Amino acid sequence: MGTTAEVEAHGPAELSLALAAAFTALTRVDDAMSLWKPSELQRLNDAGEGQPSRDLRAVLESALEIAAASAGAFDPTVEPLVRARGGFGAPALSLSPTERTALLARVGYRRVHLDRDSGRVRLEPGTRLDFGGIAKGYAADLALDALRSGGAEAGFVSLGESSLGQFGKSLDLEVRDPEAPAGQRGQPWAAFRVEEGAVSSSGSDQKGTHILDPRTGEPASGLLSATVVATTGIEADALSTAVFVLGADAGLRLLEGRGAAGFVLLRESGARVLRATNGFAREHALRLAPGVSLRE
């Protein structure tokens, strides 16, 4: 899926088989849902309809549910816009208003029809799916399940540092500087702790491109980054994108309404601000860098 994977397993048992199973799970999701190579998802997009595998259907169902909950701020049909703007490794491009309007006619989660009984999927003409904002979280969930089943007492999965999952031990994470130049990390804005669960971050610095607002076709603006802590990777992954597109007020309300937690980074009158869901600072031992203020 255009990223790298890191997997750790800890415990007294021999864990080589558990690690192998975790990487097998990651490969399975990549083979099904990557748009960086031939995949099941590519074939479904090309055909416009089909009978998805269990994995692909599970991700599609979650994607459609979160798309509805976020009023389309997260939308799995954004592929035509992403590709036209130079996604999937191509140089970044700009679109004219006419081109953008034509592409928006092909985007919208309501253009995906999933028959709950048969499991078949039909895409309206021109509509194509992109699971780049959710599949990594699903893959991390499967890899962690493989580690647990293989006897690991603690496990950790990181996919490109933007989607993390862990169990069995606490994890201390730094909040990277979203304004650091490409290729540099800068000084962290904050740090926090996760006892167990999944973490996903979305930001304007990702891969040197902007996250698109599926409702307008324009790059999302207003936030520097959004980070979500949830019980599952699939939830955290999709919600971090939705929050980044929605902005601080609506995004944090969405998290609290779904029982997730998180924060956003932004500039207010030039000052560095971290806005978080209620109780986040206390529950996750949030530590702020000098010059960063907190709003809950």
Image (tube, grey):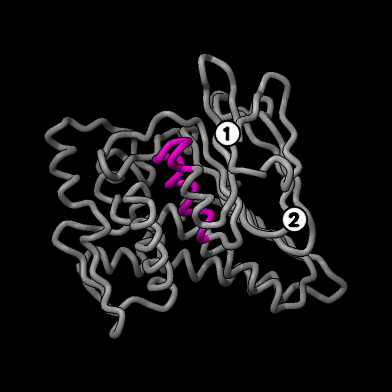
Q: Judge depth for marks 1 and 2 and give the one in front.
A: 1
Q: Depth check: give the residue in front, 160 or 270.
A: 270
Residue drawn where x is 27% and y is 73% of the image = 114
Is-magenta flag for residue 45?
no
Q: Quadrant of residue 25?
A: bottom right
Q: Main secondary structure of the magenta part?
A: helix
Amino acid identity at mark 1 = Arg
In the image: residue 253, left or right of residue 116: right
N-terminal-most mark, 1 or 2: 2
Estimate the x, y position of residue 41 in percent, counting from the top left. Answer: 34, 66
Looking at the image, the residue that sits furthest to the top is 270
- Residue 275 got which mark? 1
Residue drawn where x is 47% and y is 31% of the image = 223
- Residue 240 got which mark? none
Mark 2 crowdedness (10 Å alpha carbons): few <14, some 14-19, many ≥20:
some
Mark 1 crowdedness (10 Å alpha carbons): few <14, some 14-19, many ≥20:
many
Image position of 292 with respect to 26: above or below: above
In the image: residue 199, left or right of residue 118: right
Estimate the x, y position of residue 173 in percent, counting from the top left. Answer: 71, 43
Under circle 1, the secondary element is: strand
Range shown magenta: 234-251
Residue identified by numbered label 2: 195
Q: Quadrant of the C terminus?
A: top right
Q: CA distance from mark 1 to mark 2?
A: 21 Å
Image position of 174 with respect to 10: above or below: above
Estimate the x, y position of residue 240 in percent, counting from the top left. Answer: 49, 47
Amino acid identity at mark 2 = Glu
Q: Depth check: give the residue in front, 225 or 284.
A: 284
Under circle 2, the secondary element is: loop
In the image: residue 275, left or right of residue 110: right
Is-magenta flag for residue 244?
yes
Residue drawn where x is 53% and y is 50% of the image = 256
